[in-house]
Amino acid sequence: MTVLGIETSCDETAVGIAVDGRKLLSNVVASSMDLHAKYGGVVPEIAARSHIEAILPVLEESMDQAKCTWQDIDALAVTYGAGLGGSLLIGVLAARTLAIAKHKPLYAINHVEAHLYVNFLTDISLPGYTPRNSQPAFPILGIIVSGGHSQLVLFRNHFGYTLLGQTQDDAIGEAFDKVAKIIGLPYPGGVNVSKLADHGNPQAFKLPKAKMPHKYDFSFSGLKTAVLRLSQQQVGADFTLPSGKLPGLLSDAQKADIAASFQRVGIETIVDKAVEASKEFHPASVIIGGGVAANGELRRQLAERLPTPENGGPTPIEYPDMKLCTDNGAMIATLGCYKASLHQPEADPYSLEIAPNLSM
């Protein structure tokens, strides 16, 4: 089963081709990040227009990379939510058109769920990739950490899962981006906060962790506000000082210590709940998905605290290749493979609509 996946939920135009949910033939991503950098974040209208320009060249390059013709493609898969409405629309319309014109079955993919599915890829011959050694075993504890989502999910099988908890406000990646703005780091904020944190003291400041009514839910808005108040305090000001003035008043050392302290507590918030869920549900494996899965502090804390074979525990944990953490077509194609092979309902190419607020 060879599936072509299209992903356009935010600012990446991506197409990947996967076989049987294990082998990756191609993964091509065109990002419009440079266009958004001067605005400090993704501008939906610019993202949508970029998808219009990029979708056909990316599609053609992915087919060439995979050495495939349309006769080789068994099905199409496309992200229909969650994401930016205008961006989703371009990918869905492209997939619907192709499904009709090429007479291929079409599968609608949940972007959040798909982030975890790159962990099922074990055969990648593309240069520069390091795939997992083996596929994860069920039951699986899935940790989704991205700019728009923070969730813990327990999978009993491919399409039988329980959402254990999720963020009730900001996602962890969104919090990283907002902290970056507070201390004056450029977009993309998450990567730059992590880089600066390497030069700071993670124990320099005590920051709060939210206490939630449901033990597996998250909240990062309070942590973000605490960083703002801490930054104002560090320059001898009170809450009336506009956040836009802070970058010019904070020293480099203060910025590094704030970044490191925030990263430690933000990641601990995720890992605390992952450890608790692992103890309660005893998963056979743990998988991570989303842009924040590339974060070195997250990987360090999980390796140190989860009961893995490396530290005498029973639960293996591996991570997706760094290039498969951010939005990509490979994750859409891989989940599409399982939808097709396990006889999940097809989408109607004449009526499939986008779902910007889709959740698991």
Image (cartoon, rainbow, N blue to C red):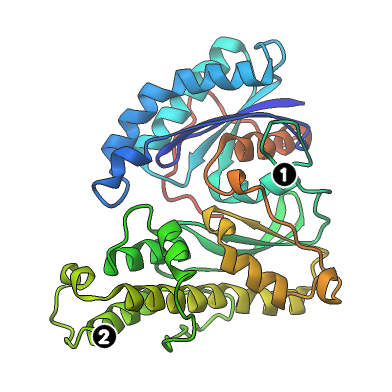
Residue in the image at 46% along x and 29% along y: 91
Instruction: Classify residue 219 as left or right of residue 36.
Output: right
Instruction: Tell me whether the residue at label 2 lies in contact with that at label 1, contact meaning CB atoms closer than 8 angstroms.
Output: no
Instruction: Classify residue 8 as left or right of residue 273.
Output: left
Query: x, y (%) of residue 130?
Result: 72, 44
Residue 350 appears in the figure: no
Instruction: Classify residue 271 as left or right of residue 310.
Output: left
Query: x, y (%) of residue 150?
Result: 52, 63
Report the amino acid beneath label 1. Thr
Residue 104 against residue 37 in the figure, above or below: above
Residue in the image at 67% along x and 40% along y: 335
On the rendered image, what quadrant is the N terminus found in?
A: top right
Residue in the image at 46% along x and 70% along y: 197
Report the amino acid beneath label 2. Gln
Residue 76's disc is none
Residue 233: quarter of image: bottom left
Q: Residues within 10 Å of mark 2 (few under 14, many from 20)?
A: some
Query: x, y (%) of residue 77?
Result: 60, 31
Residue 250: quarter of image: bottom left
Residue in the image at 67% along x and 23% along y: 75
On the rendered image, what quadrant is the C terminus found in?
A: bottom right
Residue 228 appears in the figure: yes
User: Which residue in the protein does label 2 denote?
Assistant: 234
User: Which residue in the protein does label 1 denote?
Assistant: 130
At numbered mark 2, what does the secondary structure look like: helix, strand or loop? helix
Say which of 150 and 339 sits in front: 150
